[in-house]
Amino acid sequence: MTPSVLIVGAGPVGMTLASELTRYGVGVRIVDQAAQRTDKSKAMVLWSRTLELLDRGGTQGAASFVDAGFKVEGVTFVAGNEVVGRVAMDAIPSVHAYALAIPQSETERLLEERLVEQGLTVERSTQATSFTMGADGVEATLQRADGTQETVWADWLVGCDGAHSAVRHALDMPFAGETLLSDWFLADVHMTGYPRTDTDASIHWHSDGVLLIFPIQAGRYRIIGDLPYTDAKTAPVPTLEQVQALVDRRGPAGTTLFDPVWLSGFRINGRKVAAYRQGRAFLAGDAAHVHSPAGGQGMNTGMQDAVNLAWKLALVVHGRAEEALLDSYSSERSAVGDEVLKAAERLTSVATLKNPVAQGVRNAVGRLLLGLPSVSHGVADTMSEVAIHYANSPLNGPSAREGVRPGERVPPVAGQVPVGAGVAPQFALFAEPSAAIDDIVTEFGDLVEADVRPALHAGTISLVRPDGYLACSAAKPEAIAAYLARIATHADRAPVAKRAQHA
């Protein structure tokens, strides 16, 4: 059978999308030109919001990722030898109130194991070499390592194939932005003498640059810093001795680096497409947006792109929602991409200030603001991505006067089945029991969970999307029914349940 969706790229974003779609019963084929998944640490943090979303799928939810990772409980900001402030993660309003340090190699391993459990295999050493877009699908040519080719047809195409995306190039979608004129180094090393607990990361603002130390596990750390720009084609790869010298100058005294796992040089690109959809094709992750690693948002943002797209695409593929629902993917996630890009640029600019006066102002302002609990908590919420919301989404419906607003995240409740779990992408009703609520569940059974959850606020009916964001809230059930009628595929027909009664 021809797959409904062809996914190009089997990194964390592509495999997250494949897992979500497969869980929702959508036919998927996922290909990657690499012979095997990465063995490098690369992106190495899963934030709270991503872990919440992973809890919705797999037999263990996010538990296997948490077990394989290392919990980081805070970030300390240091200027010279003085602590400017600390951002604690335990105040994040989430069941995952921490940053999970986990090498990308492990994230990919666990995602691929999840796919195997679901009966889906990544087709490796398989390159998508050409695409022909049609009004109702795409024809793609796949080429394997032995030179054999296959022409396939899919109803939908998703490019999750990274910053040099073949899908994006084939669609001729401009990747606007720039490369910063500075070189950066990355070192995954073992280290002794770290003066803080291993559960704390630290950011060192120094007169000649920035140094980030992020724990991967007890005794092993990711170290990142900026260097003067060279005219080489790529940023140079540092030696362990060079990294040690930079840590000695910018970082904590008395540290000793040894047994490097990975040393690399890189340059920072800030680029993004204007729209994430073109007809029957979509972009997600680095194929749609790349930015500074400041804040560690890249992979998480891409995985959340995948979750956002998956439930919408599944509803459309199964004929339960109008195709117009898919337009909201680009609208919502492009706005998030813009914000992540701007935030990463701001963090990078602040951290790499060279003017002594500006550095002094930064340190003083940082000391003042990070001393305020509201600011510190806000920074933690932003870093952990629980603050992401869709305030201007075309999917936002009416709103009651109190509580969470449409487009905002509804925090998962510990011990409660996450919204969006299971084999169908369904909205969840949070309401007090009534005959009118039962009627909504009956009428929109394809879109709404059968079990109604306790009301979020007395006298208010809340409808939560399959990705855990509030769709709408109201005092009267008619408003909720009207919202669902707008989403459902029955523009000129009786509702699904009523059609079944007359069949």
Image (cartoon, rainbow, N blue to C red):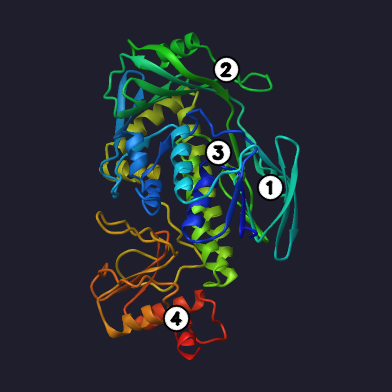
Is 329 situated above or below 273?
Answer: below
* Residue extending farthest bottom: 502
Q: Residues within 10 Å of mark 3 (few under 14, many from 20)?
A: many
Cα–Cα gap, marks 4 and 2: 58 Å
Foreground mark, 3 or 4? 4
* Quadrant of residue 363 within the rendered picture: top left
Dots 1, 2 in contact, CB < 8 A: no
Cα–Cα gap, marks 2 and 3: 20 Å
Please name the amino acid that badge 2 sits on: Val
Query: Which residue is tagged 1?
Result: 167
Cα–Cα gap, marks 1 and 4: 38 Å
Q: Secondary structure at mark 2?
A: loop
Q: Secondary structure at mark 1?
A: helix
Query: Which residue is tagged 2?
Result: 237
* Quadrant of residue 445 within the rendered picture: bottom left
Q: Is 321 or 384 nearer to us in this picture? A: 321
Cα–Cα gap, marks 1 and 2: 30 Å
Please name the amino acid that badge 3 sits on: His
Query: Which residue is tagged 4?
Result: 482
Q: Residues within 10 Å of mark 2 (few under 14, many from 20)?
A: some
N-term-proximal mark, 3 vs 4? 3
* Quadrant of residue 86 within the rendered picture: top left
Residue at image coords 45%, 29%: 351
Query: Which residue is tagged 3?
Result: 291
How many numbered marks, from 0 up? 4
Location of residue 229 in the rendering, given as x and y in whole percent from the top left corner:
61, 21
Q: Which mark is residue 296?
A: none
Asked if residue 387 can be seen in this view, the reply is no
Dots 1, 4 in contact, CB < 8 A: no
Please name the amino acid that badge 1 sits on: Val
